[in-house]
Image (cartoon, rainbow, N blue to C red):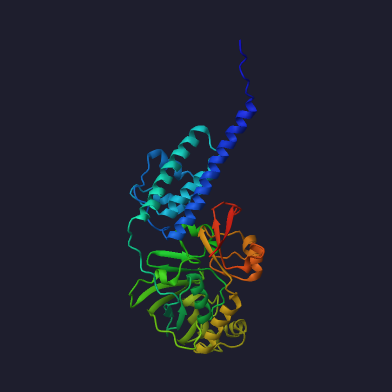
Amino acid sequence: MAKKKQIKSGDGVSRKAKLIADQSVALAEYSANALVAAEQLRIKSKPVEGLSFQDFERAVLVGLPALSAKVRKKLARPDESFTVAEVVSMVMAVAEVIIGAGRNQRVELLLTAKNLMECLQKSFVMLDEPVKQKKPKAAGLLYQLKITLKESQPPIWRRIQVKDCTLDKLHEHIQTAMGWTNSHLHHFEVGDQLYGDPMLLQENFEEMEYEDSTTTNLSEIIPENAKKFRFIYEYDFGDSWYHEVLFEGCPSEEPGKRYPLCIDGKRACPPEDCGGIWGYPDFIQAIENPDDERHAELLEWIGGSFDPGAFDPAAATKAMKKGDAEKELPKVGTIIVIGNTKLDSVIRKEMQLIPGQILDDKALRTAEKNLAAFDATIEVIDTNDPGFKDILVRVKKK
């Protein structure tokens, strides 16, 4: 009688663990590749057609820790549609929990991931069919904006001309043109949508359903053919300095001029931390009235003098250009950040991998030796790991 082959239980457990780990890695790699493809094809914000969930799939997804609050809220509403980027984030969230899941839960996770990936695949395949593409806006377009501090009487305002840039860069232009010190948090409000920096806003970024101001360009929020368009910039969530930003048009660049420019404006920027727009008049009254009990105290606090009517467009322009010069680096390579832009602070500091930043030779050598010797594009793919450890840096020749 033939002896039955004995299988060591440890080997079975080891093979099973490896299989589960391979499944997790495969899902994570699929997600990373899908994000790259979606970015290159410019379909990250495109709705995924034909996507529907069974009850168990919806329950599985809502319970995933890595899923953003925004996507969870949408999952609670049966008729919501999801973008390519959101569906990819669901697959990645599945990949992160599959190793620690029990048998039955793992089956549900895999079935859910299969449904998500099949619908994503259809989205990519549909690109072979004729699609109406959005006409891209002209590169290097010049924008004229009037920034007015809301509720200021008489009005405190600036008129600036800037080339197309991220909203994060526009924030810097507004800060220097107005005369603020960039010492507090800020965000933009365009219609019903908020835009902010995910690194600064942290958990509020997802809870309040922000879009990323570090990767959104001015040209993306201003409607085509818009003659006048307004949006809000809020600085310092304590004093709440609200600014109306009015788009006045796209003038032609003047030969020999370097941008950004502050071409006009009126009155001085209020001091930081003076109590907001409602406290500012009291501050002015106190420093102008020697009999006010706070006169000496506030004059000393402001540095001895303050002229509320003073403003020099040339000085504001110089400050705007100085800010650009301090941050400008040689155009050796460009970072493209796909997905979550909450890059680890150590990575930011040591490798200077900042979304949208132009890298200098030193930073390029840090990322890859001798990379500066050829023309290349660096792609930084943040895979949403809670510890910010799983960040892929890809280098491609153009």
Q: Describe residue 386's horizontal placement relative to residue 156 as left or right.
A: right
Q: Describe residue 342's horizontal placement relative to residue 40 as left or right.
A: right
Name the residue rendered at 50%, 80% in the picture. 280
Please, is residue 124 above or below residue 362 in the view?
Answer: above
Return the x and y of residue 233 as percentages of the image width and height. Answer: 45, 72
Say how many tags the image has.
Answer: 0
Q: Quadrant of the N terminus?
A: top right
Q: Nearer the viewer, residue 232 or 54?
A: 54
Q: Nearer the viewer, residue 273 or 296?
A: 273
Please, is residue 46 above or below residue 178 in the view?
Answer: above
Q: Nearer the viewer, residue 218 or 158?
A: 218
Return the x and y of residue 326 as percentages of the image width and height. Answer: 61, 78
Return the x and y of residue 129 as percentages of the image width and height. Answer: 33, 55
Whether residue 271 is visible to the viewer of this picture, yes or no, is yes
Whether residue 270 is visible to the viewer of this picture, yes or no, is no
Name the residue rendered at 45%, 75% in the picture. 164
Please, is residue 251 above or below residue 382 in the view?
Answer: below
Return the x and y of residue 161 as percentages of the image width and height. Answer: 45, 82
Q: Quadrant of residue 380?
A: bottom right
